[in-house]
Image (tube, helix red, strand yellow):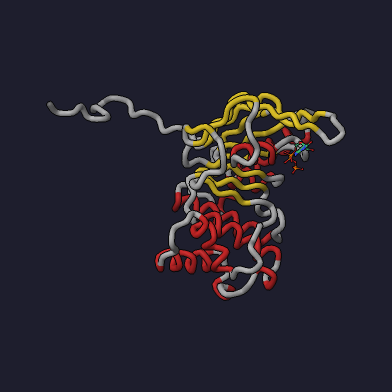
Amino acid sequence: MACAPAHPPGAARPLAPPAVALEHVSQVFRGTGGQSVTALRDISLEVAAHSFTVIVGPSGCGKSTVLRMVAGLLPIRAGTGRIFGHPIERPRDDTAMVFQRPALLPWLTVTDNLLFPLRHRGRPVTGADRDRAARMLETIGLQDFARSFPAELSGGMQQRVGIGRALLGAPSLLLMDEPFSALDALTRDEMSFELLRLRERHRSAVLFITHSIPEAVLLADRICVMSARPGTIRETIEVDLPAPRGPQTLRLPRFHDLCEHLRALLTERA
Ligand SMILES: Nc1ncnc2c1ncn2[C@@H]1O[C@H](COP(=O)(O)OP(=O)(O)OP(=O)(O)O)[C@@H](O)[C@H]1O
């Protein structure tokens, strides 16, 4: 007997599970003095596969806490969290994280820092991996520093290594916590455009935190605006700017309208 096709003609395809799904997540921290801090209250958030979601909100509203939970670095005790349909239990190999400051290994060269996560997964590094690392060095503008050690690089160059390292593994989900905040304005713009190009190529879903309004609007498909602590999602903005995004996006009237809207939300009293 012939098997029925997985998707008979005309039937709706099952939807891919979202890259990230948080439902009714709260977080209370206990301080060393016994006092409790409600960092998050009833957060629900979805990042569709291949999409780019940015979280913005006042300092201390719980943005990094959300990211640490999604990364599997902080257990979710109230509410549920899933990545590609799987409960979040620990850091996953298909997820990469970029922090404000890169945690590079000082005794490894730039190339070996790029390759470190692949090694860490316990498989031998191949010639093809080394070729990809060399191409990534060009992408992040550090081709002349392949054999340098982190201490020989500026802070911005180190950060570019951290971003290249995360992207080299072609993660299905990329978590970025203010990754460009330590970069000068020009490098910051260049890295944003590069991130857009790389994402187009790898189709990774991205969950990204920033305090920069133009950066949020340039990068995001969707912006989640959080309230002051205890953090909740105040508003979700769908960013309807045309693709591909790049330097030309910054000149669009719609880009400026969205920036104004976001600025008004962030400055009005919660
Ligand atoms: N491990 C912890 N123990 C106790 N309190 C914590 C802990 N981590 C975070 N907090 C508290 O939770 C709240 C949210 O912190 P979080 O770092 O997530 O905010 P944020 O929005 O990322 O801030 P910023 O924009 O300033 O980086 C803050 O009040 C912070 O003091």
Q: Which of 23 and 255 is in front in this view?
A: 23
Residue under the image location 65 percent in, 52 percent down: 179
Q: Nearer the viewer, residue 99 or 246?
A: 99
Residue under the image location 61 percent in, 33 percent down: 237
Q: Nearer the viewer, residue 166 or 8?
A: 166
In the image, residue 62 sits, relative to residue 168, either above or below, namely above
The x and y percentages for residue 13 are: 33, 29
The x and y percentages for residue 266 are: 74, 35
The x and y percentages for residue 56 are: 68, 39
Residue under the image location 54 percent in, 63 percent down: 114
Image position of 1 (left or right of 88): left
In the image, residue 189 sits, relative to residue 203, either above or below, namely below
- Quarter of the view holding residue 108: bottom right
Image position of 68 (left or right of 60): left
Which residue is the extreme one toward the left?
A: 1
Q: Quadrant of ligand 1?
A: top right
- Residue 257 visible in image: no
Residue under the image location 68 percent in, 63 percent down: 156
Query: From the image, which quarter does the C terminus lie in?
Result: top right
Image position of 60 (left or right of 64): right
In the image, residue 152 sits, relative to residue 199, either above or below, namely below
The x and y percentages for residue 244 are: 49, 49
In the image, residue 71 sits, relative to residue 237, either above or below, namely below
- Residue 193 visible in image: yes
